[in-house]
Amino acid sequence: EAGVVQSPRYKIIEKKQPVAFWCNPISGHNTLYWYLQNLGQGPELLIRYENEEAVDDSQLPKDRFSAERLKGVDSTLKIQPAELGDSAVYLCASSSSGTGGYRDTQYFGPGTRLTVL
Amino acid sequence: GNSVTQMEGPVTLSEEAFLTINCTYTATGYPSLFWYVQYPGEGLQLLLKATKADDKGSNKGFEATYRKETTSFHLEKGSVQVSDSAVYFCALSDLGGAQKLVFGQGTRLTINP
């Protein structure tokens, strides 16, 4: 079974430029997450999708960040314009959510390391 | 809100040493608890999990027991190997199937031959 796929793996841009990250979750996983991982820190949730609906985007800085998950499969996270402080690793994860509060495991992709100069 | 606190790193041990990485949590209700591992250049991988009090998660020689009375989920391994060198993250997931993982800051482990 293929894991979560992310691209690109590395991205270097100048500040104020736009950037986009792509994620393809594990086949059949209806829940998709984007996390931000700063150097030396644990990941922090940015946004969670259930199918194509963003059900938790409370931590997403909406002035410059946006995300979409068309057709409830692949997802794209965009930053426009990027700032120096956005340098970090952006992780995508997916899970197969059950019903009745069943807690499913999140599977992570390798991440995209963004450097803003 | 929910939070996870891990012992500060980095941790350096010799091969075959005993490992303990402490993890305590603060949460309402009864969260699920996880240990994830991040090898150099790779994504986070689930190492083990426990979903209720007194459960013991285990994998690859690692173990952790969900202790509700001490709100802890310490990671242990009896004899570490060089290949265990990685960053280890403790995390919790809140109740209700919301699946929002809250991570600790991570502990970098280096095993010397």
Image (cartoon, grey):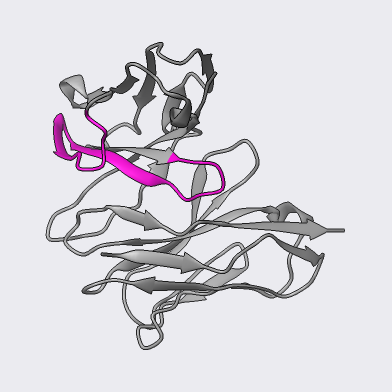
A29 and B104: which is toward the camera = B104
Q: What residue is shown at x 32% (from left), y 70% (from top)?
A: B51
In the picture shown, does residue B35 fall above or below A52? below
On whether residue A35 falls in the magenta region, the answer is: no
Residue B15 vertical placement versus A5 (above, below) = below
Quarter of the view holding residue A63: top left
User: Front-most of A8 and A41?
Assistant: A41
What residue sits 40% from the left and 38% below the top? A36
Quarter of the figure with the N terminus of chain A = top left
Residue A5 location, x and y as percent?
A: 43, 27
The percent position of residue A53, horizontal first and vertical second, equals 12, 33
Tell me, yes or no, whether the highlighted magenta stretch contains residue A49: yes
- Describe residue B75's horizontal placement relative to residue A2 as left or right: right
Which quadrant does the C terminus of chain A fall into? top right
Residue found farthest to the bottom? B69
Residue range in magenta is A37-62
